[in-house]
Amino acid sequence: MHQWVRRGLWFVCAVWLGWGSVFAQIIPSQNLSFQEEGATGVPASINGFAAPGAGIPDSVTGDSSRIKPEIKPDTRYLDRQQMFVHRDFRIRQQADYERLHYWDEVEALPGFLQHLGQIGKPYQILRYGLEERRLDLPLWRDPIMDRYDRYTLSPEHQVAYFDTRTPYVNVAYAQGPDQLQVTGVTLSQNITPWWNMAAYIKRRQAVGVYRSNTTDHYNIFLSGNYRSRNDRYHLFANVTWNQLSNELNGGSPRSSADQYVIEDGLIQELFEPYTRSFFKGGSAPILSGVLQRRTQRAAYADQYYHLIQGNDTAKAYSKLTFRQHTLLEGGAFRYTDQGLSPTSLRANLIPVYPTLDDSLTSIQEGYDFSRLRIGGEASYTLVAGRLFRLNVNGGLSYARTGLTKDTLVVAQNTTSQYAQGELSIGRFVVRARLRQQLADRLGAERGLRIEGEMRPLPQRPTYRMAATDTLDLTRDRDPLVLRAGYDLRDENPSLFQTFFSGDSGNVFLPNPNLENEQLNRLWAGIDLQGPVKLRRGDTLLPMYLRVEGFLTRIGRMIYYDQELQPLQMPQGEAQQWVGATVSFRLRLLRHFFLETETTWQTSTGSSVDAASAEYLRRIPALSGRSMIYYDHRDVSFAEYFRLGIEAWYHTPYAGQTVDPVSGEFFPSSYQVLAYARADAFAALRLRGVYLFFRMTHVNEGFPYAGYYTTPAYPMLERAFTLGVNWSFFQ
């Protein structure tokens, strides 16, 4: 018992010391123009710098004799989903070099990103012709808006659980201009060999290059996991708190018609007048004193009962696991604008408040939400030899979501069922998932997903080493992987689109007659990976080529017009996107690498009105991200060193603007010209400490000034950022 008390006291002291030092630094520097504290959630990689389980094992650092892990082997991240399907779930904690130098997680995501230039603000990611909300991702989904928010930590998917036989502490810090700071601290300690506790805090803040655009976000979780001595029972639990406070400026004023050229009915920017009309930190923006705050708090518990454990060393065995999980969540959203000027808003050619009542001089919007979800699942696995593996699992859950806004009170009861399986026979794998959701206020949602992979060639060694080299590497690769899949589903409209009624602030007319969207997606791809000729000092980065083609069709599509009113295409009308994504890594001159991910896509289909026609042009025909860098380990001054240039690029597209109140993007009849943005970066490792440096938008002003992805919201200026990621108590 005394060991439990001693280790518990250590954990409490570590939390007090670790958090106390961080709070002492970050809390006094309030940069908001209002008396509210802000907070944000965290995407799937914890603190954006040290991603549990998301490290890149093909770029680990080592000495001249044996590869070393970045963080001690007794620091493990526990993957609950892998445990549920009876795979190895104790994953070595690693640092992800690919993400060390990103201070905004959305920058490194696949797909086309449209954002407001400032860190932590509303954004939109489009992939396969779809908004990100139409993909199945382990992220927090807003129950009212029905969209993902990567700045909010999901208690179900993104809280980290550890197995740390010795204390583990990770500190990450990034500093940029205009009081841009990102700070994250992770603490973990095994109280006993069977019980671990972990804590995490992150703060993200920035005054911003442009006026009235402050960000101040917090994210906190406390997690624990317990396992019985015979490993038949596992319990994972956490409490989370997210608070996101933002000041929005509505973008730059666009009230002069001589700043535009109209071609084919689309507004196109003349960039030089744009730059003159909105100086950084200078001229007054459209909105000032706008306060937006979202809070989310939750408690979550996830229990696993391993009824049949099997013997992994036997030629044939089976396993059976039952799982029960409970989520209790609540939150609130508040939006206040006390300084409206209807005259100036009406003169602006790009709408800021598309549903504004012209007689209003202030807006006060808000709602509260709650969610209770209880579910149970079962998973069975059968293994026969090295060539056969079958896993089938399924579950049933009940959820009750509540929405309160002024006099509107909505309670929606939902039941969900799913069944899925994975069959591996030799070098062939097929997966299938069938799901259904029944809601008392909306129509039934159903979905079917089938995908398969084939590895026609036997595995081969990844690394080719000189006969005189003593590096101990046994990793294998699949030279060729063929894959294809089909996704069929129908999706409910969001509660916002269906039930959200406006008050005297921002008039919004919901559409109670909206029906489910019908989505079909087909994709096929090929992956090639070549061998790596390795010598001392080389980074373990294999060359690869991945090509994936896709065809997406959305019937009965729900869309917004230029007044943010939800509309729906009639039966039989649809929009289609067809395209391909090509990504590769090419090794040049031993230590130089070129990486690229480029997507080409085109759209066809129905445009029943001017607003729906804009949706066919909202994604550029060509967009991507390329990076060329020098990569070396065991250099004279560091254990690992990377130096490079990264560029984002796109062709013209019809940019959508955003409603500051709801965060929803809608058509603006605005043509965004082609552009390429470049960043320069460096990262190195010194005895467990990772340092990174980044110069953002080094080509600002070339080939023209005033670049942005969302009309009237300028991109951040050229800025230098540096940071550190340090794991200690090792």
Image (tube, rainbow, N blue to C red):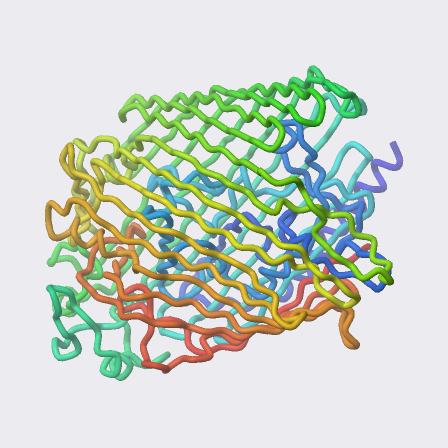
Q: Looking at this rendering, what residue extends furthest in the right direction?
A: 2
Image coordinates of residue 215 in percent, x first then y, are: 44, 63
Image coordinates of residue 556 in percent, x first then y, are: 20, 36
Left or right relative to 682: residue 330: left
Left or right relative to 174: residue 90: right
| Residue 97 can be seen in this image | yes
Label total for image: 0
Image coordinates of residue 119 in percent, x first then y, are: 44, 63
Judge by depth and name the residue closer to the eye, 573 or 699.
Answer: 573
Which image quadrant for residue 379?
top right
Residue at 52%, 46% in the rendered image: 153
| Residue 721 can be seen in this image | no
In the picture, the quarter occupied by the C terminus is: bottom right
Residue at 61%, 19% in the rendered image: 380
In the picture, the quarter occupied by the N terminus is: top right
Left or right relative to 659: residue 414: right
Q: Is residue 50 above or below residue 539?
A: above
Left or right relative to 727: residue 419: left
Q: Is residue 282 above or below residue 426?
A: below
Q: Is residue 512 above or below residue 655?
A: above
Q: Looking at this rendering, what residue extends furthest in the top direction?
A: 307
Which image quadrant for residue 49?
bottom right
Residue at 24%, 35% in the rendered image: 499
Judge by depth and name the residue closer to the eye, 133 or 364.
Answer: 133
Image coordinates of residue 650 in percent, x first then y, are: 35, 65
